[in-house]
Image (spheres, helix red, strand yellow):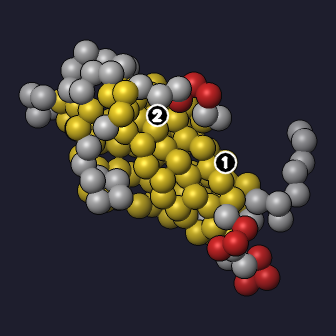
Amino acid sequence: MSKIKATENMPYNAVTRQIRVGVQPFYMQEQSAPDDCHFVWSYHVVIENHGPETVQLISRYWRITDAHGEVHEVRGMGVIGEQPTLEPGDAYQYTSGVPLATPSGIMEGAYQMQNEKGEPFDIVIPAFSLDSPYQPVRLN
């Protein structure tokens, strides 16, 4: 566990119950195969506890939407095999990845947390864009 990081410098942020989640996605050219419709991103997440109570991350929920509008939902215990506990002022960070069959998409979700009394609550993972150089950019 580390002390508070600067998630406000990350491009995607959300705050729920004084817990800030920041996300930075990265397109992984070396793991992608565009000719085979295989596009891979990693994403770095920082969770900061700015609140007064100790909390634990219990589970995660992801909603992943590709460029064709196909939705894939992922639920599971913890993140990368861990269920970190964050005391006030603590930060936790991890990196994971996601493949898509399209050159762009969107991810969003929630973490189920638990306070010291065992009371569950959800915190928002901000929606973030998965963009590759193979997706034309259109300004609206």
Dot in front, 2 or 1: 2
Please name the residue that numbered disc 1 is placed on. Answer: 129
Tell me the quarter of the image containing the N terminus.
top left
Furthest-bottom residue in view? 36
Please name the residue that numbered disc 2 is placed on. Answer: 21
Q: Which residue is at a point 82% across and 60% down the rendered structure image? A: 133
Q: Quadrant of residue 120?
A: top left
Task: Name the element at disc 1.
Answer: strand
Q: Nearer the viewer, residue 120 or 77?
A: 77
Tag of residue 17: none
Q: Amino acid at mark 1?
A: Ser
| For residue 23, side relative to residue 15 (left or right) | right
Viewer can see residue 69: no
Q: Which residue is at a point 46% across and 38% down the rendered structure image? A: 46
Q: Which residue is at a point 57% across and 25% down the rendered structure image? A: 8
Q: Considering only vertical position in the picture, is 64 above or below 16?
A: below
Q: Give the image location of residue 4, x and y in percent.
A: 41, 25
